[in-house]
Image: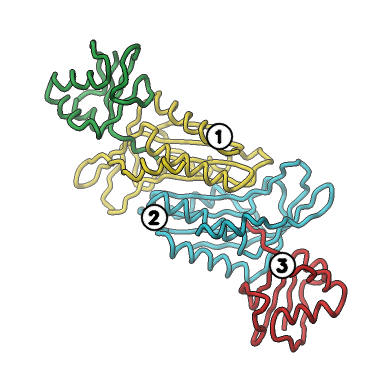
Chain colours: A yellow, B cyan, C red, D green
Amino acid sequence: MIIRVQSDPFDVGATLNSFAQDRRDIGAVVSFTGVVRDTQDDLHEMQIEHYPGMTESAIKTIAQDAVSRWRLADILVIHRYGNLKPGAPIMMVATAAAHRVAAFEAADFMMDYLKSRAPFWKKEITQAGASWVASKDADEDALKRW
Amino acid sequence: MIIRVQSDPFDVGATLNSFAQDRRDIGAVVSFTGVVRDTQDDLHEMQIEHYPGMTESAIKTIAQDAVSRWRLADILVIHRYGNLKPGAPIMMVATAAAHRVAAFEAADFMMDYLKSRAPFWKKEITQAGASWVASKDADEDALKRW
Amino acid sequence: MNVMYFAWVRERIGMPQEQIETQAATVAELVAELTAREERYAAAFADISALRVALDQELAEFDAPLSGVQEVAFFPPMTGG
Amino acid sequence: MNVMYFAWVRERIGMPQEQIETQAATVAELVAELTAREERYAAAFADISALRVALDQELAEFDAPLSGVQEVAFFPPMTGG
């Protein structure tokens, strides 16, 4: 299990290539990358605040929950905080398993829980000003799937 | 849309890094990598046979179906044929979308259909001999989800 | 008509493809014709439920007509991904 | 007791954390005490349903007891991922 909370950028491809690479019992690897989106072409930057200490323990709890629910060979979470530019990777999750269903479901589960249970808050700085990204009822509802 | 059917190895991480990298309207990228598994530690190699011509058109049909069902910014499929060693990537799918649900569902859908509708056949060469990998009823049943 | 065989169908019949002149109206009739021809075809087509067929590179049913078809392929269920 | 504020709660109250001596038995009592103190707290705690609370870095309910708790954190619903 690899969990990193950092302000530094990270290389998604290199991280994925080195993830679980020495395991022979893996048939499926799923990755999710969250990227700073700039749909309206007006985003200056995204500021991500977090709760040091709680962040790491909350992510670890979620990852351990995933490991207890699915047969996973390995799991990885990297999540950035600080100021990010449009197009930059915010975070990634990767899951490795013998079979694809476990890898898919565990990654999907991780994202649902990281979204609503890991203490990060996003603020968008646009030409019009700054605004905190609001959580959606759908994000909380998504947890009921599991 | 990027579709490649090839015998050459490919770099999963580099492929993922270059996928949809110039798009500003992407918030989520999901990748799936299928890997040659050697759970019993007795696999010499996996031989993948395919139906040239039909393979490309079948994958394209499946990818176009995904694009029509979900709001995707881009989609990628790479699938190898020929002789692969344990631990080698067999294939990968990547989906990019504004939102994570579309990226996850489309990648999951792609895998279900590639498994049962793209004309590839796997043969495992072990110390005990050679045997064709059998399809599972569950693979066919999985298509009913969509 | 070009007839192609893949995976263990190819191995049982002993060749990847062949040109066949036939009056068969459907895939099923072609299978019956081949099965009657030689033991290796009978072995490959013994259990039709374990086989799939493509006509001109599109999946089809065994009762599909062969009229106008240029390429028929027989193979086991696919195992991609 | 160390009380922390994040995101717009932090911005409204105007500081990331502070030490508070309180006799409040529950989170709700602490909120009432802070709300009565100054307008900026009242603004931050105006709509409790829009807030979350963590006690010693674990999510908790607003009726949870504060006995033995060393760190309380108030923040909006999280938006990670």
Residue at left 30%, top 42%? A45
Residue in the picture at 61% in, 74% down: C58
Q: Are marks 3 and 1 on the same chain?
A: no
The residue mark sitting in front, 3 or 1, is 3
Secondary structure of residue under mark 1: helix
Q: Which residue of the protein is positioned furthest toward the left in this rendering?
A: D39
**What residue does disc 2 label?**
B23
Label 3 – label 2 distance at C-alpha: 46 Å
Left or right: where B123 falls relative to D46: right
Locate residue B120, reporting x and y percent.
67, 62
Q: How many marks?
A: 3
Q: Nearer the viewer, mark 3 or mark 2?
A: 3
Q: Residue furthest bottom?
A: C23
Q: Nearer the viewer, residue D63 or B81?
A: D63
Q: Position of residue D30 (x, y in %)?
A: 23, 18
Name the residue carrying label 1. A67
Give the labeled residue for mark 3: C49
Q: Residue at x 53, y 65 (%)?
A: B62
Amino acid type shown at disc 2: Arg
